[in-house]
Image: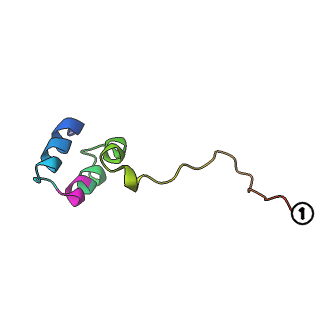
């Protein structure tokens, strides 16, 4: 069973759910990680490049 983004967001905004509650919902698969990042974009990890090559700065 998954909780909808709209319901979780509304309950969070009303103060009925905490951020920790939403994190728990993700851990127990009641809420998607994508929806969590939509609610808390500051928690989203920085995008990484797909290249496996290390970045090398040019030398003078």
Magenta span = 18-22
Q: Residue at x 37, y 49 (%)?
A: 41
Q: Is residue 23 magenta?
A: no
Q: Quadrant of residue 20?
A: bottom left
Q: Residue at x 17, y 49 (%)?
A: 12
Where residue 45 sits in the image (x, y, percent)? 47, 54
What residue is disc 1 on? Answer: 60
Q: Residue at x 39, y 55 (%)?
A: 43
Query: Is any atom of residue 4 visible in this view?
Result: no
Relative depth, front residue between 55 and 24: 55
In this rendering, the answer to whether 56 lies above or below 9 is below
Where residue 3 sits in the image (x, y, percent)? 20, 40
Does residue 59 appear left or right of residue 41 in this picture? right
Most common secondary structure along the magenta stretch:
helix
Does residue 56 appear left or right of residue 6 in this picture? right
Query: Is any atom of residue 46 visible in this view?
Result: yes
Does residue 4 appear left or right of residue 60 in this picture? left
């Amino acid at each position: 069973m998954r909780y909808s983004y709209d319901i979780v967001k509304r309950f969070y905004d009303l103060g009925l759910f905490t951020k920790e509650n939403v994190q728990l919902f993700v851990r127990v698969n009641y809420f998607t990680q994508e929806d969590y990042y939509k609610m808390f974009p500051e928690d989203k990890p920085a995008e990484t490049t797909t290249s496996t090559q290390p970045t090398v700065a040019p030398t003078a």
